[in-house]
Image (spheres, rainbow, N blue to C red):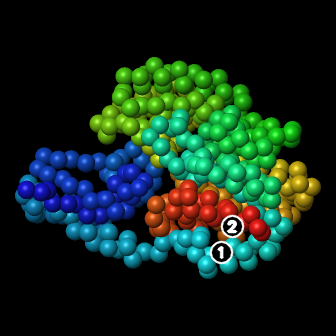
Amino acid sequence: GEAPVLGGLAGGDEEDAGSQLLAVGAGGCFTATLGNRSTQARYYTSQADVTALLSRLASGGGGDEVALAAGGAADEAAEPRLPNAMERAQLLRIQSRLKRCLTPAFCLDYDGTLAPIVTNPAAARLPDGVAALLQQLSDRHPTAIVSGRAVEKLQAWVDVPGVYYAGSHGFEIRGPNGSQLNYTVAAQLLPEVRRALEVLHAKLAPIPGVQIEDNKFVASVHTRNVSAADLPAVDAVVNGLLEEQPLLTRTAGIHVIEVRPQIHWHKGKAMGWLIKCMCEMLGLPSGADSRKATAMPIFIGDDVSDEDAFAELRGGRGIPIVVRAEAPLRRSTAAELWLRDPQQVAEFLAMFLNS
């Protein structure tokens, strides 16, 4: 017969998070992590569910099959979730906040925000009409793409003259066509990243499904197509690399492990520097205090790395918006609003063309 399900364990895939039920039969096993932090585990769970499961196992309940009570899931369902940015009440709130400054300044992630997530990372492209939308948006308001992708890729794929680009999670920043803005962070560590790419290519080649992407200052190891059984081997290779190259560090995103320079620089820092440069290029006040009344940052992103930017904008310093398939729990993100997918992101941005 069918195996009972374990409730309260959410699938590791973004689209299934918070809703997937896991079937576990006799002799089955699974890996899980507590909380909602980025991890290579296949599932996550809560402390309450772990306690309930261990208690049930200790009492011998379930025989060959175990059913975990879904009390933790019920508690989670009652928790407050973020409001959608397209709700009328939220649009009015955004409008009210924008009245306090001269212009919104958009900082937008690429994958999963402007372009849909695809199986082959090299095939991620903007949907029809989005480039034209970005052109119109950048004609009216300062607009930047802030992504883990290399700047050269972003420029080729977006191809909008008036847009700013912050690639490699902000390690390389370039201004719109015709500007002299060209800023690089940690250029002295670029040879370390080059060497890391060589090692990763050599040692991960035998593992099926691994895709390694050169994002200049970031070596991205895509694991979307790697089996659960092979993930520990990928993890071991990356950890072994970092033992040999202590000037680099690892960060994790949705189905990706990234190796990059170990310095205190991220999308949040890059966004702050971009807003300053945008104000200067527009001839507007750009000081740390004065630019609060000049440009209101609106950051939209979907991945773990975007949380650094969301955190920078909390407390009225901007409008952080996360992209998720369903409304996320408030405690799971530093964002204050959410949008459903790249299509809804485009609809939201289009509302600013007449403002």
Q: Residue 205 carries which label?
A: none
| Viewer can see residue 28 | yes
Residue drawn at (45%, 19%) of the image: 202
Q: Pinpoint residue 118: horizontal percent, then vertical percent.
A: 48, 43
Residue 256: horizontal and vertical position, in percent? 48, 40
Q: Distance between the residues labelled 1 and 2?
A: 10 Å
Residue plotted at (62% across, 76% down): 90
Say left or right for 36 vs 168: left
The three-letter amino acid code for the residue at tag 2 is Met
Residue indicated by mark 1: 91
Residue 351 badge: 2
Of callouts 1 and 2, which one flags the residue occurring earlier in the amino acid sequence? 1
The quarter holding residue 346 reads bottom right
Q: Nearer the viewer, mark 1 or mark 2?
A: 2
Identify whether 123 is placed above or below 203: below
User: Most extreme residue toward the right, as rendered?
Assistant: 283
Q: Position of residue 61 (x, y in %)?
A: 10, 63
Residue at the spot 48% in from the left edge and 72% down from the top edge = 81
Q: Is residue 305 visible?
A: no
Q: Where on the picture, by quarter, is residue 104?
A: bottom right
The residue carrying pointer 2 sits among few (fewer than 14), some (14 to 19) or many (20 or more) residues within 10 Å by Cα, namely few
Are discs 1 and 2 less than 8 Å apart at CB?
yes
